[in-house]
Image (cartoon, helix red, strand yellow):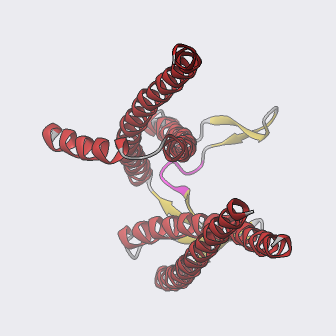
Amino acid sequence: MAATANNTAKTEMIDLTKLSPDQLMQIKQEFEQEMSSIQDSLSTLHSCKAKYAGSKDALESFQPDWENRQILVPLTSSMYVPGRIKDLNNFIIDIGTGYYIEKDLDGSKDYFKRRVEYVQEQIEKIEKIQLQKTRFLNSVIGILEVKQAAAAKMIQQQQQQQQQQPQAKQTA
Amino acid sequence: MDKNSAALYKKMQGEVESYQTLQKSCVKVVKQRALLESQLNENKCVMDELNLLGPDNKVYKLFGPVLVKQELEDSRQNVGKRIEYISKELKSSTDTLENMEKDMLKHREAVAKYQQQWQVAAAMK
């Protein structure tokens, strides 16, 4: 697996060295943009996962002997009304696009467990892509630096030649 | 000669402008497509969940502030239709995007061509 990744990196390198610094800069900018959008989606996914995990933890802390227990129901984040748990085994879960389903305790736990796993899968997928892009971006930056150094050297040499030329004329 | 290069410059300007407007609408379509894609994903998740349910599970749909009980089969059909519709939309937006990219390439080539002609004209002066 690592060997094939190296190989593709090498073929990319060969192509890259043929590009002009301007083109490389463009590629670099495009990749940086992509990287930031990847970063955004990763942070969204992480917050999603935290939400699902939070719901799951809340369900895990439910005890079977909580029937008729007095609780405080939040009306807003800072105001509560007293209530009593009447039904321990029915939860209504928002599954998206306006649909809600009723599930028992175990089913609900299972739902959130699956959601967390699903989001984790997506995170891993995107992290893989991120790693690849980072590698590619780094090689682009590396080549760009080499090219820029070479260009700077050429300009220096030209300047030196220009300085030497008047002297040559004088001697002639 | 000067007239010629001015005309060339004007043509080039026109191409650049149409390229830029295309680019803007392209960005819009890309955004729209991302939205459609996320909706499709969400609907697919809902569909998966609905398919996992048994006949004794209750399904509700949110209408404004109230939850209304739904038949499981109806919900499945509804979500299925929605997935179909969004897939169609996604496909058509992908097509428009492709066409736009082709047009953009044409404009870019035209700009390059005019640029070259302009440079040649400038060099001959």
Q: Position of residue B117 (x, y in %)?
A: 66, 70
Report the residue at 49% width, 84% height from top.
B84
Relative depth, front residue between A38 and A136: A136
Q: Quadrant for the N terminus of chain A, please.
A: top left
Magenta stretch prevailing secondary structure: loop
Relative depth, front residue between A169 and B85: A169
Residue placed farthest to the front in the image? A172
Q: Does the magenta-highlighted stretch encompass residue A91?
A: yes
Report the residue at 70% width, 70% height from top.
B19
Relative depth, front residue between B112 and A57: B112
Q: Does the magenta-highlighted stretch encompass residue A119?
A: no
Report the residue at 44% width, 36% height from top.
A60
Image mark count: 0
Describe residue B20's horizontal placement relative to residue B82 as left or right: right
Q: Quadrant of residue A29?
A: top right
Q: Is residue B82 above or below residue A85?
A: below
The part of the chain drawn in magenta is: A86-92
The answer, for residue A124, to whether it is visible in the render is no
